[in-house]
Amino acid sequence: MREPLSYGAHSHGASSHEVCKNEAVGKFMEWFQDTENVGKRTKRLEIVGREHCGKTWFAKKLSEMSECVASHFCRPDEPQSSEPATVIRSIGEQLMRRFPNLVLPRLTTVTLLEDTVSALDHFLRLPLETMPSSSKQVFIVIDSVDEEETQILIEMLMDILPTWTRMVTTAKQESLVDKEKNKNEILELDSIDDVDFKRFIRSKLPHCHVEEIREASEGSWFYVDQLSRAVEHGLIPSDVIPPNGVEKMMHLIARSLPGAFADIVRLAKTSRCRPTNQQLLAVSQMLIARDISVLEKDIRLIRQLIGTSQFSNSDSELFDVPDIWFYLVGEENLRCHAAWAEHFKTKRRKCAQDICELAYHLSHSTTNPINAIKTLQSVGAGDLILRCHIIDLPTTALLKSAGARLEENNYDIVYACSVGDVTYLDAILREIKPIPMEICFGLLTAAARGNIEMCRFLADHFPQLVTSSCCGEWNALRSAACYGQLEILHLLLDKGVDVDECGHSDRTALRAAAWSGQLSAVQLLLQTGAQVDRRDSEQRTALMAAAFMGHRDVVSVIIQYGADVNAVDKSGATALHLNLSNGSKQDEHSETTRLLLENNADCKIEDGNGRVALHLAAYHGDPCLSFIFEKNPIVDIMDNMGQTPLMLAASQGQLTSVQFLTETAHADVDSIDNNGRTSLQWAAINGHSKVVEYLCGIGSDEGHKDNDGAVALHYAVTHDNVELVKPLTNKHTVEAKDRYGQHPMMIAAANGNLKVS
């Protein structure tokens, strides 16, 4: 059901910037969606602006988009977050989650730091190069790249990313590395018209004078957000004279916060990692002489007022506040370190990480060094073997004094396997005894790279690990198949590896090769006896994987080997469903769709949402929509939500599909779904002005009310788009009231949409 939209309403759970930065988002989408001029447009967009202008918030909103495949946020108060090794690992781990068939070697931190260029080559470039190209443009977001070292890393990443991956970064100023070259596109948040900012002020501080707040805040979104929270909680009157500047505003709010505010924030800053609310409460009791129930309320109030997760009530949530509050209360002090040391000292079931954290806080407190050493010895620090320096030099020195052994070695077995240097690996193995997991990952990486001599060396020296899976899923056979390394496949099969060998996910080498479009590998595996309809943990087959990716030739071969074209997965989807759900407009994808239909793919099968092929084709604007309609000419078929193909096409702004469904297939334009909504209302909800104009032009009922009593205009005015609103406006719709008694003008005003109101 639709929520009432009252002027200045604060909806719990909503983002504090929910109604802002429409212009900035529009400029980003213009840059990202300009696929016709990809060769002319830069692959990188730099978002720049002064402090507190909303860069990080904007980056977070972009990171939530489905097209964002990875994001990383560098934090000024956490220097390690900006280190190249941290950024590289963060991006790599997210890419592997997004692309399940991507194999990235687990390189050591030493390798990443000592030879970043070569390490990046083997860690990202080579794996990404051999991946099948994405049918859609995607992007990566990296926030706060203000350090020169980070800027240099970004440029290195730009050189190795595939053509279908773009980069978005935020910083206080344009990259110094590329300023002279001027090859990046710049989006200056400071220069964007402040209509969005004024709208944000109205939504957050409806009782204040907009111009007065705008001048006092100096354009800071942070200022408005923090002041509005204080007003909302009644700590500051709504008619307060706004102080000039962010710092004065923070001092005003701080005076209204609990007396323990400064100590609580200092404790949070002193903790090397962001503490949970429960951890902070436990440590606060050691430092602050207040009742635990009072402290708990204080922490909750502080989190609600200045925290980044203001609406979360879970004790397991991190106590996370903007860095600027840390600077306001001053640097962490020795008492705070002593409190954290006591916390880790008294913690039950300490792990190695806990002992290291204890050592960190002891080394930065006033604790007598001899007593600190005795404390660490009593908790087992003498049993630790350190592979590198821990946290910082004082921490490492204290741990060594307590008996921990520092055994530095720069050997990186996985890297040696990745580059295929058998001689170097042999020398390493003469010096150290590797753990099995390192060999497994090394073999996995060598198989992906096609390093045949390395794979033969590993298979001869560690035959028991040839069939082992890394993390329960990947094995060398699947890795070689994914990257089409035929020599490696022959070697492993000759060594006796089962062609259907798979890990806990049940994803075989055949499925990996099919997903990647490795035709020769698919043929080899099928000829060797691979089960053509073997299912993975999601009940998906190799045919489904190839169909989703649009690999026509692979689909053809798998069908020739007797694959079940109409098999369904856990969600009830067939290969045809998955093929259409990709949303690709490329010719090969359309050819794959036609091939499936020519081989008797059933267009009438419903998936778990009650959707048939026509629903998905309409939703994505698929070029094969007319061909699918010929196979199943029931145009007004409804899914589980009562939505027809026309409604889905309208909701996504697929004008060509809407025109076909109405003009050729004769769909009912005023059919309603389970919420009483029509295709026109769905187009208005999602702001598709061209579809709205077209539907109104062919006679759609703009006065129809849904189950909430809303007409299409109620939804259209939430977008500040005059072209969207015009076709829906008449004397009846303007005065129409929904179930909450609201007419469209009220909703437009509540959203600060001055153009349409």
Image (tube, grey):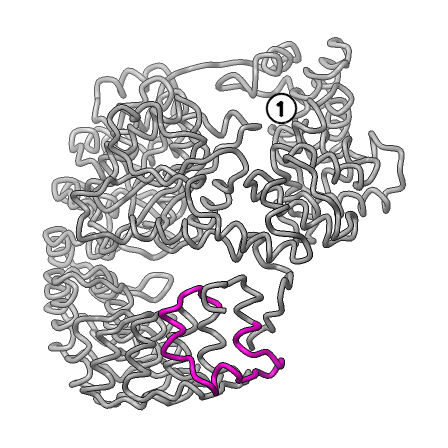
Circle 1: element type: helix
540 relative to 711, above or below:
above
Asked if residue 164 shows in the view, the reply is: yes
Q: Residue at x 38, y 18 (%)?
A: 432
407 relative to 238, above or below:
above
Q: Residue at x 35, y 43 (%)?
A: 140
Q: Which residue is mark 1?
A: 356
529 relative to 683, above or below:
above
Q: Residue 351 versus residue 598: which sits nearer the camera?
A: 598
Look at the image and tell me in which quarter the N terminus lies: bottom right
User: Which range of residues does the magenta coloring cover?
Assistant: 718-746
Taking the image as shown, residue 434 lies to the left or right of residue 579, namely: right
Q: Amino acid at mark 1?
A: Cys
Residue 447, given in percent of the width and then of the height, sits at 22, 38
Q: Residue at x 21, y 22 (%)?
A: 421
Q: Residue at x 61, y 20 (%)?
A: 383
Residue 396: which quarter of the image?
A: top right
Taking the image as shown, residue 629 lies to the left or right of residue 475, namely: left
Taking the image as shown, residue 469 lies to the left or right of residue 406, namely: left
